[in-house]
Image: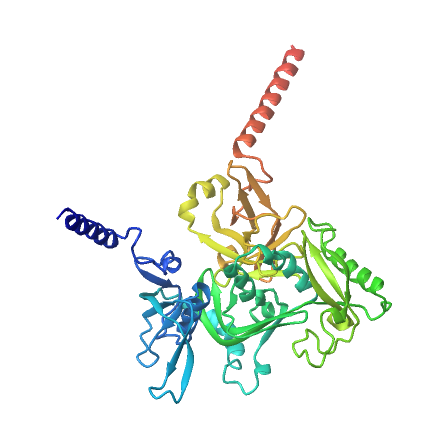
Amino acid sequence: MSKKILLIGICAILSLTLRSGGAFAEENYFTEIEKDLVDGALIVKADGPEVDPNIFEVVYGNIYYKYGYDIEWDWEVKDYHHITLVKYGEAHEVTTTAPDGSWSSTDLVREKLAEKTIEIKYTGVDSAKKSVVNSLITPIAAKNSWNSDDWNDIKRYIVDDLSFVNFFVAGYHRDASLNSNELKLIADRMANFSPQYKKDFDNKNVQLVIDNRAGDGGPFLEETMGFASVVSEGYIYDVIPAVGARTIREIFIPSSIEDTKEAYVAAVQKRIDDYYEGTSLAGKVRVSYGGPICDIVCDFEEDGLMADPDFRGDSYFLLSYEGSEVDFIIQKNDDRITTPSFATGDITTNVAVTSDDPTIPLDTIVVVNKINKKDRADTINKLGLAEADIYDINLHSDAANRDITKLPNGKFLVRVPVDSKYEGKELAVYYIDVNGKVEQFEVTVNDGYAEFVTNHFSEYILGTSEGTQANPGTLDVIQYALLIAIGCGFIIATNLKNSARRR
């Protein structure tokens, strides 16, 4: 009797344990995506598929590639607001034999361990900003499709020469220490280092995120291709059905260089040294001889993904920075020697930032927030400004995973659009630090923009005092009052002394 009671008790405990999610509860395979859900839903910062049908392709791809789940979705029903994630076990062989033994077949089968249906919510985007983005991408999207007769017609953004060096230093060299999702981030966004991409998008602060549906690597080459989200400040404003990006590990030198590996190394090293001269990266990016090209590729005809089909050199070389190195090739070509420069502009406010400092990763974009004047009324009154516009300006690089707040050895040229209310008035730009210290910047008006030079970013105030003396330099109003008082005291003391002498 006691054994029976004990057995019933154990069963009861096991039942309670399973129901309460204890040690014997079913494993949760979806913890990774659950961390990103809000009230059980996946939030997508974009217009819904009813507005842009391609957006669901991006959502589908991101779930599959980022989290690694299999997906069940009815392409006939087309419920864009729900998706089912599936977790399968390891594949194992199952053999089926005919009853009479006349045949048998062996298949790989995976057991479904769990599934989870999640809701998808779309936030929508600012229609005015979306209109500007559409105007930028229309010429590109019109000729990029998976239905293209020739994949070579699909737009590919090239990163090579010193743009490749910038990419390597900014983030590519960190590959060995990154996890798979972060590695994918670098591959997804390498198009943003391409000078052609910057030109096509008028240097605006939008980025291409390609979901790696296709592509490959080859000797001295990485390539990705897929649906490209056009992203600004975390929101997807449009989707281009097919865009590619290609990093070609090739640096060009003048045709006059002697054909020796020593001369090639010296020529590339000089280009890189000239590029980083006077910056914090000076002397840190090094070039060396790698070895015979046949150590990597011998048959140029068979290796169709060779970085440069015209390359016929006999050596490869190494680029190193902070303990990491990557192989590359050197080619003589006067026409393809380029020195990239940095430029970015805000799509909403039209504030623009440029710099010749090569330490800035080329994927860096400006993020601008125009601040309500009422929120800074005390500051505006302190400066004695009749009119003012306040901008919080920042820069961010995805590849470097950091904000670019200051250039120790470089300068930014900032261009702020001038409103008609400032016409004919003398302008100035002010920066006030956390201690209330005022810094005034000289302003030049050029083509409707107020231009000033700085080496750091924060809040800047563009304004005019309408004839009132603006606060120059970094002196506070109290300091000016003290100077005036001292001056008046000196004059009074001098007059009293002269009066005493006359007596």
Farthest residue in the left direction? 1
Residue under the point 77% across and 65% down: 291
Q: Is residue 281 left or right of residue 202?
A: right
Q: Is residue 431 above or below residue 48?
A: above
In-image side of 291 versus 144 (left or right):
right
Q: Residue furthest top?
A: 503
Position in image of residue 333 (x %, y %): 77, 72
The answer to which of 204 and 475 lies nearer the viewer is 204
Residue 141: give x, y in percent of width and height. 51, 78
Q: Is residue 203 visible?
A: no
Whether residue 187 is visible to the viewer of this picture, yes or no, is: yes
On screen, residue 285 above or below 295: above
Q: Please tell me which residue lies in front, 472 or 205.
A: 205
In the rendered view, how is the structure colored? rainbow
* Residue 162, percent from left and from top: 70, 63
Query: Percent x, y for residue 330?
Result: 76, 68
Residue pictured at 38% horizontal, 60% vertical? 33
Quarter of the C terminus within the rendering: top right
Along the line of sight, the residue nearer the viewer: 494 or 183? 183
Q: Residue furthest right?
A: 258
Q: How many marks?
A: 0
Give 168 or 408, whichever is nearer the viewer.
168
Q: Left or right? Give the position of 135 relative to 472.
A: left
Task: Identify the residue shown where x is 36% and y is 86%.
Answer: 98
